[in-house]
Image (tube, helix red, strand yellow):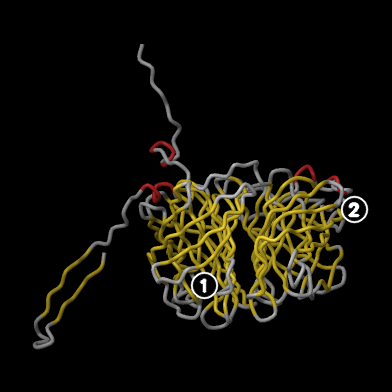
Amino acid sequence: SVTVVATSTDDNTKSAMATITIAIPVTTYNLLLNGTYAFEISGNNTFSGVYQVGGVITADGNGNITGGEQVYNDSGTIVPGAILSGTYSFGADGRGAIILTTSTSSIGVAGVETLGAVITSGSHLLISGFDTSGTARGSMDLQTAVNPLTGGYAFVMNSTYPTAIGGVFNIDTPGSISGAGSVVDIDSFGLIDTGTLTGTVSAPDSFGEVAITLTTATGFFSPALTMSGFIVDDTHIKLVETDSFAASGGVAIAQGASAGTYEDNTAWSGNFVYGVFGACEGGGTAIAGTLTADGAGNLSGLTDTNFQGLETLGSTMTGTYAVDGSGTGRIEASTVVAGAEFNPNFIFYLTQPNLPMLVLETDNYSLATGSASVQATGPYLFSGNYGLDFTSLVSGAESDGTSQITADGIGTFSGTVDVNSNQTSTPVVGLALTGTFTPDPSGRFASTVTPDSGTAYDAAFYFIDSTQGLLIETDTQQVTFGEFQAQGTITPDLRRGKVAVKTIKK
């Protein structure tokens, strides 16, 4: 409730007062957000540069955040703290906002953080930093298990600071990384450090946060690379760097029973959709495409590349790869993109089957991180409701947004986008957009997107399957990268987390 007082400007002794109750509407999507969720966002704040936030919140299914914890990294200044309370609200299309009241007044807007969001299911949301303190992009996932970490995890971390990190840490004894089965690659516009790593991993706290300390063999991070990991389940961890070296964030994905078994090129084969996003000299980098690994060291596919306006669009890609024989799951790959001024090189990190691989770009032109997912067999149908997120970089400015679109399966879509920028510091809600697309058997759908501001953008949607994929801008206006996911069908029973029961009358 709030109290509104109106006072006469002609006679300030005359006034009136009213109490108004602001109610959060109980929509379908508000009911759906129910449980404990881990989240991570990466971006640029308004004042001092890059920042990352990772944490855990608890939602009650009725529009309230009842608690949580987080770690905020502001250009290497680490601010841990509690999430005391909050609210959330989603409209009929799944777009909405999550407002978090933290224990630290120095972050967000006087300690209050606002996340823009589009919900795709009760277990997954695409989110963005959506207040005047800064802009960022990331995701939020339902936490389904909190167990001590064990075994091998591929990981990547990145920010707009000029260092990206990838590797595998193998927890081979409880709480300890001995170095066996572990590897790290550190890229700063050209690979500068590759080697083994050792370290420690703490037991999870009540919210599923673990402290990870990694020491590289060459001592690049002095004394060590430290991070907080927020457990999603037994296979996924969201990461935020917690040392003073940089402000990077990322993800770790388990290798499971496959850890240590990747010994030759036969360990990698199949069709994949991949994409990476990061920085190059003077701007941003986005790469997306399809690729086929033949199990014998050869690559082929389609690729869109954008090195801050130096583009190759829908070009053929060929290349070679080599699986590290030590079993870590590390794969070095070199590519040649037809017509490209720069040919990107990558390191892939294998995870357990049917989970995305992680990717680190390692050439002299840019640094970026991302993922590669097994591509389902077509045809690919762009039909129904989708949640979408994106990051755009141009001339030092970053914009991030979330959107909901509805595609007709034939060639058009429309929707609404919420976007924020670290330059304007004024989040924009409810910007309408329309688009067209051209289906293609490869899963690369060329598109044009027009917001109601009137400026059209070209893009390519790469379908992993008909429910999800990656997107990349394909013109010279800016560098944009994001993902899209179908919004699942929601029934009343599933909204409340209940099992549907059929009663048979005898």
Q: Residues within 10 Å of mark 2 (few under 14, many from 20)?
A: some
Look at the image and tell me whether residue 205 can be seen: yes
User: Is residue 398 positioned above or below 254 on the image?
Assistant: below
Q: Residue at x 36, y 11 (%)?
A: 506
* Near-viewer residue (57 or 31): 31
**Which residue was labeled with disc 2?**
326
Q: Residues within 10 Å of mark 1 (few under 14, many from 20)?
A: many
* Near-viewer residue (201 or 229): 229
**Which residue was labeled with disc 1?**
399
Q: Is residue 242 left or right of residue 27?
A: right
Mark with earlier residue (2, 1): 2
User: Is residue 361 positioned above or below 355 on the image?
Assistant: below
* Near-viewer residue (223 or 371): 371
- Name of the residue lying farthest toward the right: 325
User: Is residue 430 positioned above or below 262 on the image?
Assistant: below
Q: Residue at x 44, y 56 (%)?
A: 404
Q: Position of residue 427 (x, y in %)?
A: 42, 72
> What is the secondary structure assignment of the residue under circle 1?
strand
